[in-house]
Image (cartoon, grey):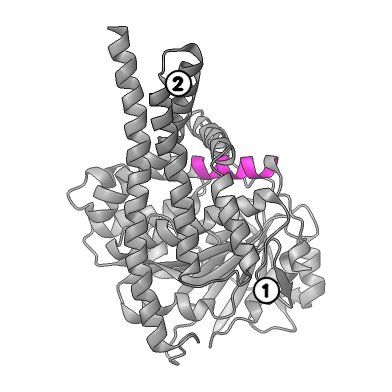
């Protein structure tokens, strides 16, 4: 009897990992089809981002907390974007370092009192500055309330109907706004659109622009390049044609301001405010039967600095996992609603089974199969089958992500860099992904125990932006 129980448990773990990686491979196929269509469309319009002269004005909102290392370069990058009409609003969220002083000195800020409407709530604003050098730059200095609270202050200050949320450790490719606004021009139902986030570590940045994409010397950063390619190019790209994108990265997303205010702005009681807002937009429009579209585009690019030490990276991944759990649990009704559609009936169950609960199942699976083999209760054949579907198919997924990159945008032009990334795609499956599983399980525990959330410290080198 015990033998049968152990046999079924082994089979269950093997089937789970087979289902997990099989579903990702299916997303990979959908992404490839979508990407080829997108590339054909781009070939027809040309490599240069289309400029039609009817693009709506955009407010770029940049929350900042202790970002003195990169804030100069990030703001300069935003100010030099190729777009007909836009403003940059930096929200200093009670930084304890010299972020505000750097901004005042670099951009010649002077006090500029102005009333802010209270469409969404946030912590008190202490001062508002404008730049004497750049007419479209303002800085809001407010009491600390977290990233979501800072974005809400930015929404209240925004003068335009579309706002683009970006991170203060990021730089946008010069044509990114022109590209990410296209869904709003093509379909009036569009309420949100997101672009691709790539790793800036190891790249050459000059004057606020990325001159050449390169690889960092740090191995953790290289692993993350592969991760980001996999997550964006065949994760979100696969869901986009079904109008089922549940995540738009907080580092780069364009939103209809009125629609966001209709749902109450960003929630300040979650660490995953970016995903929670997108899932709430899905639920709001479906429950009220309002036609809408939420899109992901592969070529508007945001470059960001990633962690290069285990402590910072672990805290980041735990925070992401906690945010995902908060977002999915709060909007579970989307999955059981008769109006759930693809977001509720396909994307939510997928994310719940493979992303929300996945780390726990994976951790127990690895522990049971390897521990059972050592104790002699798991056969060599069962362990081999498990490792083939858990690690072998994981390698296949990572390599496929790089193949999509190779056959599409080829951001990394040097052959040596691509060969190194293919090596990373193999090596990440032997330790790094399992370590990520542990960090994500910690995030689940933090969510379950309802620990107090906060911005979280992010160690910046700032060397890529100097």
Of callouts 2 and 1, the N-terminal one:
1
Q: Is residue 279 magenta?
A: no
Can the viewer see residue 176?
A: yes
Q: Nearer the viewer, residue 167 or 11?
A: 11
Q: Residue 314 in magenta?
A: yes
| Residue at the outermost left position | 338
Crowding near the residue tagged with mark 2, few <14, some 14–19, many ≥20 C-alpha atoms within 10 Å: some
The quadrant holding residue 38 is: bottom left
Q: Residue drawn at (40%, 77%), measured in percent from left and top?
A: 39
Residue 284 in the image: x percent, y percent? 30, 56
With respect to residue 74, does 79 lie above or below?
Answer: below
Q: In which quadrant will I find the N terminus?
A: top left
Check the picture and name the quadrant holding the C terminus. Answer: bottom right
According to the picture, the residue beneath numbered tag 2 turns out to be: 368
Residue 57 image point, x, y percent: 49, 82
Few, some or many residues within 10 Å of mark 1 (<14, 14–19, 20+): some
Q: Specify start and end residues of the magenta stretch as a single range.
A: 311-321
> Element at badge 2?
helix
- Residue 207: horizontal and vertical position, in percent? 74, 78
């Amino acid at each position: 009897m015990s033998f049968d129980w152990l046999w079924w448990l082994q089979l269950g773990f093997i089937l789970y990992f087979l289902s997990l990686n099989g579903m990702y491979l299916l997303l990979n196929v959908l992404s490839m089809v979508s990407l080829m269509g997108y590339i054909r469309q781009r070939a027809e319009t040309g490599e240069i981002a289309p400029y039609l002269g009817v693009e709506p004005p955009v407010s770029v909102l940049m929350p900042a907390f202790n970002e003195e290392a990169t804030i100069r370069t990030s703001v300069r990058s935003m100010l030099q974007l190729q777009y007909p009409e836009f403003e940059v609003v930096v929200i200093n969220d009670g930084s304890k370092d010299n972020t505000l002083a750097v901004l005042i000195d670099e951009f010649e800020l002077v006090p500029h009192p102005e009333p802010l409407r209270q469409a969404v709530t946030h912590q008190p604003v202490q001062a508002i500055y404008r730049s004497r050098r750049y007419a479209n730059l303002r800085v809001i200095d407010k009491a600390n309330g977290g990233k979501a609270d800072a974005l809400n202050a930015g929404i209240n200050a925004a003068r335009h109907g579309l706002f683009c949320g970006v991170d203060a450790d990021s730089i946008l490719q010069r044509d990114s706004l022109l590209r990410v606004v296209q869904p709003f021009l093509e379909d009036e139902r569009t309420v949100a659109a997101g672009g691709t986030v790539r790793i800036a570590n190891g790249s050459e940045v000059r004057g606020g622009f990325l001159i050449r994409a390169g690889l960092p010397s740090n191995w953790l950063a290289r692993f993350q390049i592969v991760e980001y390619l996999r997550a964006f190019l065949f994760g979100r790209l696969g869901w986009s044609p079904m109008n089922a994108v549940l995540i738009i990265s907080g580092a780069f997303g364009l939103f209809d301001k009125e629609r966001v205010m209709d749902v109450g702005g960003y929630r300040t009681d979650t660490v995953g405010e970016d995903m929670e807002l997108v899932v709430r937009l899905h639920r709001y429009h479906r429950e009220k039967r309002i036609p809408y579209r939420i899109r992901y585009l592969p070529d508007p690019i945001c470059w960001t600095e990633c962690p290069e030490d285990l402590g910072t990276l672990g805290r980041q991944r735990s925070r992401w996992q906690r945010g995902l759990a908060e977002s999915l649990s709060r909007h579970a009704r989307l999955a059981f609603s008769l109006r759930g559609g693809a977001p509720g009936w396909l994307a939510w169950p997928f994310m719940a089974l493979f992303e929300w609960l996945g780390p726990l199942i994976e951790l127990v699976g690895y522990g049971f199969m390897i521990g059972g083999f050592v104790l002699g209760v798991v056969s060599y054949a069962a362990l081999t089958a498990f490792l083939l579907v858990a690690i072998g198919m994981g390698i296949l997924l990572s390599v496929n992500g790089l193949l999509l990159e190779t056959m599409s945008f080829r951001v990394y032009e040097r052959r040596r860099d691509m060969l190194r990334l293919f090596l990373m795609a193999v090596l990440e499956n032997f330790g790094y992904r399992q370590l990520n599983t542990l960090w994500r399980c910690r995030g689940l525990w933090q969510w379950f125990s309802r620990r107090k959330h906060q911005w979280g410290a992010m160690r910046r080198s700032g060397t890529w932006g100097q």
